[in-house]
Amino acid sequence: MSVHRFQPQPFFADKNRAFWNLQSVGWAGAFLLRGSSTIANGQPLSSLIPVMISTVSGYSVTLLIAVVFRFLQRQRPIVTWGASIVTVVVAAGLVAFIDAWVFSTQNRGSDTAGLQLFLGAFYLSMTLLGAWSALYYAINFYLTVEEQADQLLHLESQASSAQLAMLRYQLNPHFLFNTLNSISTLVLLKQTDRANAMLSRLSSFLRYTLINEPTAQVTIEQEIETLKLYLEIEKMRFEDRLRPVFHIDPAVAQSRLPSLLLQPLVENAIKYAVTPKEEGAEISVTAQPAGENVRIIVSDTGPGLNEGFTRPNNHVSEGTGVGLANIRDRLIQAFGERQSFETRSTPGGFSVLIEMPLNLDEPSRVAA
């Protein structure tokens, strides 16, 4: 069952509707202000007729001015401002002429000279139309700035998504290279059953990982399931030499992180801890709360940096172009300054510590 909630749209979401609303309310306000001032000065109700005609004239003339201004906005600044001033002066003269003619027609016995009457009406018209024009350009300038800001945010979002996708797409070729190389070795050794089993598990792993978009986030629980599929493939190569251990606190199991974030860390541990040691190594993945964050630790019992063994700490992996720097970049793209990435080496092994916001929000879904 779908639930529809009313969400008010921004006033300028529909620019055409906003213009007509402002135009109508503005001139209605001008009429009320001038009309109330006329009545307050003791003038008869019939004196509201010139005020009404003047308001209608101003309303109509500003519609024509708006058409001219829309054209002038696309011109060079000097042309825009010069032509706009001329337009306002001509329009104010037209409205003043109408006002003076209406007043003189209604008050034939008045002693006020025609030129004096026109100049008074011109001053008032110039003031109103000048204010209208300033407001028109101010609103359009504001809308232009807002539109450019929205476009900039959209472009930044697209660039960020593209970079996340690029970083994520680097993982599959790297992983496939190692796995297909192992399958090729098994085929050369005529171990077809093991090669078929590894191909089947590789298919399951790729099917599972390709479900998610490159920029998508998954829960830690889903990420661990993906790791287990990956480790099933690696167990075909290393058997008992590879000993994975998982410690996932239920409180953070549903926290979200970029998909396939941990797989390169485990792969790094296999390459530099399990492969060089005859007895293999234990690889531990821990996820636990850390205040308002979640702390993830991927550690191994292989040779640490203190034992004179080198690892790609701040650089990319040899020959593949993917390493710990890739993980750091993905974290920065996903969480900005709200994350930390740290590597530690001890005589008993090597570990990577990641902290990121504890995000338990569900992904948005379209109501059925």
Image (cartoon, rainbow, N blue to C red):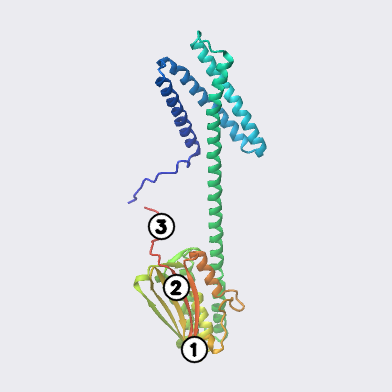
Relative to 217, say whether 345 is above or below: below
Residue to which mark 3 is pinned: 364
Residue at 63% of width from left, 38% of height from top? 74
Q: Which residue is mark 1?
A: 347
Nearer mark to the viewer, of 1 and 3: 1
Mark closer to the observer (2, 3)? 3
Task: Tell me if mark 3 has few (under 14), some (14-19) or many (20+) residues whose alpha carbon lies within 10 angstroms of its own.
Answer: few
Q: Is residue 260 visible?
A: no
Q: Amino acid at mark 2?
A: Thr
Q: Earlier in the sequence, mark 2 or mark 3?
A: 2
Residue kind at label 3, given as amino acid type: Ser
Q: Residues within 10 Å of mark 2 (few under 14, many from 20)?
A: many
Instruction: Specify the amino acid type for callout 1.
Output: Pro
Which residue is most to the top?
A: 109
Q: Pointer 2: what residue?
A: 226
Of the residues under marks 1 and 2, which one precedes in the sequence? 2
Residue located at (39% from left, 46% from top): 7
Per the image, label 1 sits on a secondary structure element best described as loop
Q: CA distance from mark 1 to mark 2?
A: 30 Å
| Nearer to the camera, 298 or 367 | 298
- Residue 177 vertical position relative to residue 210 in the rendered view, above or below: below
Residue 222 point in image, percent of width and height = 41, 70
Query: Mark 3: which secondary structure?
Result: loop
Instruction: Give the Cα distance between marks 1 and 3.
Output: 45 Å
User: Alpha-carbon distance for marks 2 and 3?
Assistant: 22 Å
In the image, residue 213 lies at what x, y percent?
A: 49, 63
Q: Secondary structure at mark 2?
A: helix
